[in-house]
Image: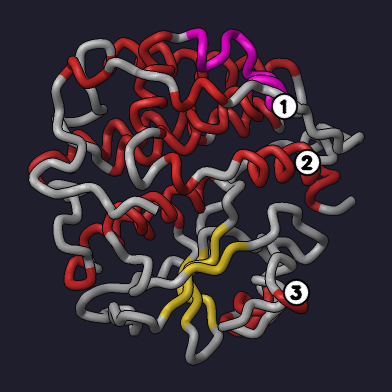
Amino acid sequence: MNGNDSLGKKGFKRSRSHFADRITADGRDGWPVEAGRYRLVASLACPWASRALVVRRLLGLEDALPLAVTDPIQDDRSWRFTLDPDGRDPVLGIHHLSEAYDAREKDYPGGVSVPAIVDVPSGKLVTNDYQQLTLDLSTEWTALHREGAPDLYPEPLRDEIDTVMEDVYRDLNNGVYRAGFATNQSAYEDAYRDVFGRLDAVSERLAGRRYLVGDTITEADVRLFTTLVRFDAVYHGHFKCNRNKLTEDPVVWAYARDLFQTPGFGDTVDFDHIKRHYYQVHTGINPTAIVPLGPDLSGWRTPHGREKLGGRPFGDGTPPAPR
């Protein structure tokens, strides 16, 4: 039974990132911040990778940290570069991300995950620590940020941001997966209650404020957004998180549209990749691999009315240039 077939047939537990080296300004782990040295490998389908895509764009790191995009459909070697000519990443020269993992640690027994940062000169994986990666882009890569880049992790608010992010991660970011890959009714119901309990708490929190923490966009908003933007398209049906759709919660739906229409958010989203990945890769819970035609996505561009709550999306900074 391969990893995709087994989803929904054995208990789900998210693995911790095995390669947790950090790329820092002082290079204390042996990986100094250096423009053009590293390559970010991401799937447009993956919510964890999408965090990195949003943060990279908001901070203007596109040139400093070039991007490799994987095929949304994995094979038995996981993420592959079949979107590129000859099925090979043109910079790293590899067919599968697993080759960079092997270059770092031969016969590594764990899963091959994105986002991942690869050292181009050596071809070795540096990190797949999705929780720390984006925080380091905000705090360690500052010398390479664009002029006017926002502060996504402001020091005076970090304790509150960390608390909000942990609650959202436990109950919502990861909760939808616990529901979708549950192997018994009790586990599913526990996860389902966590998901909607957290969505209700988020809705209440956002009813009178534009953003989760403070009056500007922070890392907390990035992490919530990448789950919300996938909710109706995949989590509501595919993962059985179907108490209500995102579009049926006026507060959270307006908040999600507000972010989607903010430069750096919606312009990193690819619903085609998202839907094909979840419905065609997770054969353990969707054995037919049929991809639904819905939902109607036109609502993402409709007025949200959140401006009346005030807030300054980029604080004293500016939005990234339009694409």
Q: Are marks 1 and 2 in contact (CB under 8 Å)?
A: yes
**Which residue appears at 72% of the width and 27% of the height?**
238
Residue 152 locus on image (x, y percent) = 22, 47
Q: Gap between marks 3 and 2, in whole Å?
A: 22 Å
Q: Earlier in the sequence, mark 3 or mark 2?
A: 3
Can residue 25 be seen here? The reply is yes
The residue nearer to you, when weighing 12 against 141, is 141
Residue drawn at (49%, 85%) of the image: 120
Classify residue 310 as left or right of residue 32: left
Residue 288: image quadrant is: top right
The relative height of residue 267 versus residue 309 in the rendered view (above or below) is below
The answer to whether 151 appears left or right of 253 in the picture is left
Residue, x 82% and y 61% (percent of image)?
Answer: 76
Q: Name, please, the residue furthest toward the bottom.
A: 121
Q: Which residue is mark 3?
A: 87
Give, as a single range, the part of the protein colored magenta. Answer: 236-248
Name the side, left or right, on which 22 lies relative to 42: left
Question: Quick check: 306 left or right of 286?
Answer: left
What residue sits right under mark 2 in the picture?
282
Q: Is residue 242 magenta?
A: yes
Secondary structure under tag 2 reads: loop
Res 187 visible: no
Q: Amino acid at mark 1?
A: His
